[in-house]
Structures are given as C-alpha cells and as structure tokens.
Image: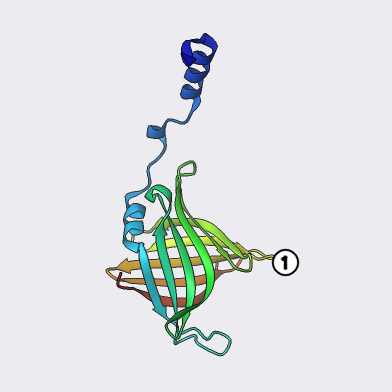
Amino acid sequence: MPLSNPFRRGAVIAALLFLPNVSLVSAQPAWFVEDMQHLVGSWRADNAEWQSAAEPFDAYQIDWSWGLGQKSLHGVLVGIRDANVADTFWTMHRYWDPGKRMVRFFQIAADGTIGAGTEMLRTDGMIYVEQEFSSPGADAVWTVIHEAITLGDEHTTRSYDVDSDGNRTPRRAYTWRRLAM
C-alpha cells in the first residue's frame, strides 16, 4: 500500500494542509458569470462611420466562446468585408483572478500589441474596463478605458484614451448586435 510508509503519509497530509482551500478562494462575482453567459456567441457592429481606403471593413465581429470549465471567455475580433472574414485583429481573454479578487481583461493583436487590465461593474450597470497597452518597439505605454452595456441582443461599447492627468479623449463607439446562432 503506497501510503503505509509514515513519511509518505505525512507528506500527503502536509500537502493537503498547505494547498489552497478551494472553498476559501473567492468565487466569481454573479454579474461577471451572467455577463459571460450572455455574451457567448457572435456579435457584429457596423463600421460605416469609420470605413475608408485604409480601413475597408464593412463591419467588425467578436466571437466569444467559453474557456476551460466555463470560468472565462475567449474572444476573437475580426474585420468583415463583403460578408466574409477579412482579417483577425485581436484575441481576448476575460477571466476572474481569485488571488487578486478581480476580473481581468487581456488582449493581444497580431502585431504583438498587448492590452491588460481590470474590469468591474459600476452602479449604473455599465461594465468598466481599464487597460494599459504597449506595442513592440514603442517606448510609451498608454491607457484606454472601455465602457460597455448589454441590453438584450445589443451590446454597446465606448472607448476613451486616458492621458497622464486622467483626462479622457473619446475614441470609437459601436453597437454590437448578436448574430443568430
């Protein structure tokens, strides 16, 4: 019997005592679980306002899918041109960090640009994401705030650049509509 050795038995007991107690690890907030459940699927936003020769996309689409154990979301943001996926821009991950007791949002672009930050639910029902971004070869790190609210099959997002004094400069706003499954 493998645990008949007192040393082995003691090692197993010590390991069990010092492993994090799963019941003590903070659970994901209910708002985050509900938001993930609602967002799983594909969402598309019209890009007519921003479309140009340099940005020829008719629309953008985010496809959200469950991560392992349905404890996180994995997203892919693509450009749509002539009803087809034309380019992939970002992969994204939304997850609960039990050690820090906060929702994290991480994204990476094809060029290696990364954005990492936290996410919270405000009292007005808006989801607030603040991320720091950096790019390969760039000296500066910049901050972007995203605000989002989902009402039924519409998910509205608005982004802002944030300067070192905390002043916001509006970026784009999109209304994403759920695509039929």
Q: Quadrant of residue 164?
A: bottom right
Is residue 113 left or right of 25 when viewed as pictured? right
Residue 168 visible in the current orientation: no
Which structural element holds mark 1? loop
Closer-to-camera residue (99/143): 99
In x, y percent, where is residue 124? 33, 63
In x, y percent, where is residue 81? 47, 84
In x, y percent, where is residue 78? 48, 73
The residue under the point 40% across, 49% down is 71
At label 1, which amino acid type do we have? Gly
Residue underneath mark 1: 137
Q: Quadrant of residue 24?
A: top left
Residue 181 vertical position relative to residue 5 in the rendered view, above or below: below
The residue under the point 52% across, 86% down is 56
The residue under the point 35% across, 62% down is 40
Q: Quadrant of the C terminus?
A: bottom left
Closer-to-camera residue (61/174): 61
